[in-house]
Image (cartoon, rainbow, N blue to C red):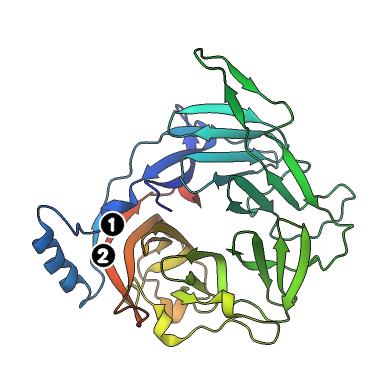
């Protein structure tokens, strides 16, 4: 797996004057968060890298790239509506958007082209979970249960398979391809976890989707047989999307406890019905050296795997008003002065073959957004 960009969707007014509410896509190069390890300047970079891992987090202010494309909000300001975004595949180039009416678009960032996609069986909301296995994108509502008879919380989007006629530019598209396949609905009783909020989720092996709930246990869906299995009454020790790093043989994500979740790793493959995966202290790290500045209020955390043991950790913060302090005002409301995101490049390495794992902290870059809202990081 190797990605060139991290996709950030920013909610803002688009157009002149007051404009219209929409979402702008900014494509950020995560490799600028890493020191060079070869070529010119390698020695100086390694020296700076060593110094950076022995002191408090130093970060540089970065300029937000120009938006690549914008999406209008699907309804007028006074109406209720929503839009969700998901990344299709591992390249980070293909982005799917779907709104509350089921209107679905595919944006190909490599070519800059947009095309309509078939609508899902039921609209998805902004909290929809998305996971890619091969060329298929799986969409699962974070609250799987629903009151409607036609409620479909789990679907899969299969890609269009195009055949090009040799010697010309005509493209043949099979109308039966490029469609959403219904995988589950609320009437399926086979260990489908209704009424539980999905707190953590991951892909295990080549065909299993794991979802974890705090009160209902952890479940696995086999994409080859379409069968749900309860793995245990335990919950995964993570929150959000958990990523497998094949080069390290471990799954990485954020811890499920604490005011700001910490980067951690565990071996999900070693779990059994009676033995949940366990986080060991030596596999928990702080890529931003604590404590946080007093006025920094954590809002969202994202872990973006880059391959070869490297990750980009993206954290979104609100800057509280002057005088607000975390130790005495953490449960009080505050006025937001600005919103910003901190991107940090981290590298996980083993000391020796099969030895202990250590985190190497590279650069941290801060992107400021004023009073705009960061809605998604993909």
* Residue 299 vertical placement versus 104 (above, below): below
- Residue nearest the viewer, comparing 190 with 338: 190
- Residue sitting at x 27%, y 52%: 32
Q: Label 2 belongs to which residue?
A: 362
**Which of 319 and 10 lies nearest the eye of the viewer?**
10
Q: Can residue 285 be seen in this view?
A: yes
Q: Which percent across, then down, holds residue 55?
A: 21, 76
The residue labelled by disc 1 is 33
Name the residue located 58 percent from the left edge and 81 percent from the top edge. Answer: 277
- Mark 2 neighbour class, 10 Å CA radius: few under 14, some 14 to 19, many 20 or more: many
Q: Check disc 2 and report its element: helix, strand or loop.
A: strand
Which x, y percent locates residue 128? 65, 53
- Tell me if residue 119 comes above or below residue 113 in the rendering: below
The residue located at (73%, 48%) in the rendering is 155
Left or right of 273 on screen, residue 303 = left
The answer to whether residue 262 is visible is no
């Amino acid at each position: 797996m190797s990605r060139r960009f991290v996709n950030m969707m920013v909610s803002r007014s688009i157009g002149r004057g007051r404009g219209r509410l929409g979402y702008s896509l900014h494509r950020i190069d995560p490799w600028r968060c890493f020191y060079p390890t070869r070529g010119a300047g390698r020695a100086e970079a390694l020296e700076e890298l060593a110094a950076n891992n022995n002191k408090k987090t130093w970060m540089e202010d970065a300029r937000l790239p120009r938006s690549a494309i914008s999406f209008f909000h699907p309804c007028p300001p006074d109406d209720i509506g929503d839009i969700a975004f998901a990344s299709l595949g591992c390249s980070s180039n293909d982005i799917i958007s779907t709104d509350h009416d089921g209107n679905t678009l595919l944006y190909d960032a490599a070519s800059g082209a947009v095309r309509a996609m078939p609508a899902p069986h039921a609209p998805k909301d902004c909290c929809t979970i998305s996971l890619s296995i091969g060329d298929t994108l799986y969409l699962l509502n974070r609250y799987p249960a629903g009151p409607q008879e036609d409620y479909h919380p789990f679907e899969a989007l299969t890609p269009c398979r195009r055949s090009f006629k040799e010697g010309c530019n005509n493209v043949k598209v099979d109308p039966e391809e490029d469609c959403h396949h219904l995988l589950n609905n609320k009437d399926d009783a086979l260990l489908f976890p209704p009424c539980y909020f999905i707190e953590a989720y991951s892909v295990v092996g080549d065909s299993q989707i794991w979802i974890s709930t705090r009160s209902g246990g952890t479940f696995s869906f086999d994409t080859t047989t379409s069968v749900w299995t309860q793995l245990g009454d335990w919950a995964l020790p993570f929150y959000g999307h958990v990523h497998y790093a094949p080069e390290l043989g471990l799954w990485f994500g954020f811890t499920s406890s604490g005011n700001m979740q910490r980067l951690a790793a565990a071996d999900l493959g070693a779990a059994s019905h009676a033995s949940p995966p366990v986080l060991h202290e030596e596999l928990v790290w702080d890529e931003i050296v604590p404590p946080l500045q007093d006025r920094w209020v954590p809002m969202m955390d994202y872990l973006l795997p880059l391959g070869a043991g490297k990750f980009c950790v993206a954290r979104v913060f609100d800057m509280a008003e002057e005088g607000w302090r975390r130790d005495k005002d953490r449960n009080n409301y505050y006025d937001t002065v600005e919103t910003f995101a901190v991107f940090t490049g981290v590298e996980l390495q083993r000391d020796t073959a099969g030895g202990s794992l250590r985190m190497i902290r590279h650069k941290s870059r801060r992107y400021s957004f004023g009073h705009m809202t960061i809605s998604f990081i993909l």
